Image: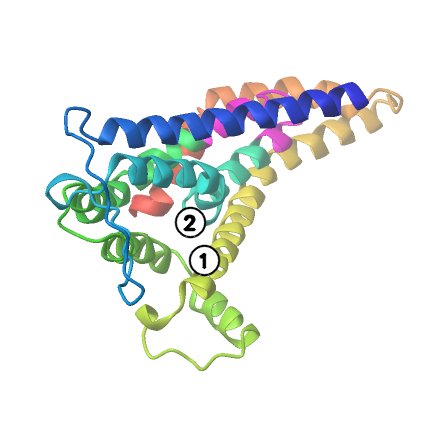
Amino acid sequence: MSTARRGLRRLLVVVALAGTLLVTGAVAASADPTAPATPTPPAAPGDSVSVSVNGVNGTPSTSVVVLIAITLLSVAPALILMMTSFTKIFVVLAFTRNALGLQGVPPNQVLAGLALFLSLFVMSPVLGDVNDDAVQPYLHGEKTFSQAVDAGSVPLRGFMEKHTREQDLALLTRAADEPNPETADDVAMTTLIPAFLLSELRSAFIMGFVIFVPFLVIDLVVSASLMSMGMMMLPPVMISLPFKLLLFVLVDGWGLVVTSLVGSYTGGG
């Protein structure tokens, strides 16, 4: 255990040093190496000191862009789980695997990867709007960081409002002891995000129930058949699993599940 802790500490130190070197190198690269060094006059006691984060022609400096990218990478898992369709898709895929009676096939990594790319497919219009309205104008110096954040939150807010039930918004608003908003745009993001997640979980459980029903019928039929033949010691799962897989393959189960998931966001299902 002590060896593992020492190894973990060394790994953290290496990551910290690498991040420091990355930021330092970005700052050095953003500077002009051919420009002569000019001494900075000392500030007078009454003068105000300002720090500029802009690069050339009003665009953000490379060091600021690197720091923002590192920050986004650290919070990316939370953003993916809370503000996209990833949670609903992953839960439905997990329900499908459990309904088939398979414990580790497909593995969690495969389900998470499929859910991630399906989420990118569903969220591609929203991500495109965020890139056009916020990211590119900020990188070109047309908007400040706060303006870019406000512009980028508009498409995400529209997506979450579209797929959030009014009951869940009312529940979170009452829980926060806040007055009822006049419009959906007046709802705070701290209230909208958990309400959106509750709505997604509710939809995922409804779809999971619908997926479970036909496989439950197969289990009941197999169990009743084994009981009538007096084969009570034989596990029904061993007999029902091949029939479940056969039914799932014949009806193109994965295609139906993915079509229903995508259609629940695009309006096609």
- What residue did someone put label 2 on? 83
Residue drawn at the location 27% of the way across and 38% of the way down: 124
Residue 114 visible in this rendered orientation of the protein: no
- How far across and how far down the image is residue 199, in percent? 48, 56
Q: Is residue 165 left or right of residue 121?
A: right
Q: Amino acid at mark 2?
A: Met
Q: Nearer the viewer, residue 160 or 250?
A: 160
- At x 37%, y 30%, the residue is 24
Local crowd at mark 2 within 10 Å, few (<14), some, or many (≥20)? some
The single residue placed furthest to the bottom in the displayed view is 179
Q: Report the quarter where the N terminus lies.
A: top right
Instruction: Where is residue 201? Give x, y as percent.
Output: 53, 51
Q: CA distance from mark 1 to mark 2?
A: 7 Å
Q: Which residues are magenta?
A: 97-115
Q: Is residue 62 visible?
A: yes
**Residue at 19% from the left image edge and 25% from the top image edge:** 33
In which quadrant of the rendered view does residue 27 lie? top left
23 or 91, nearer to the observer:
23
Q: Which is more toward the observer, 52 or 122? A: 52
Would you place residue 194 above or below residue 20 in this image? below
**Tag on residue 193?**
1
Marks 1,2: beta carbons within 8 A: yes
Three-letter code, disc 1: Ile
Helix, strand or loop under label 1: helix
Q: Percent from the top left, x then y, of residue 16?
A: 52, 29
Crowd band around label 1 with a 10 angstrom C-alpha radius: few (<14), some (14–19), many (20+):
many
Q: Residue 143 location in percent, x, y?
A: 17, 52
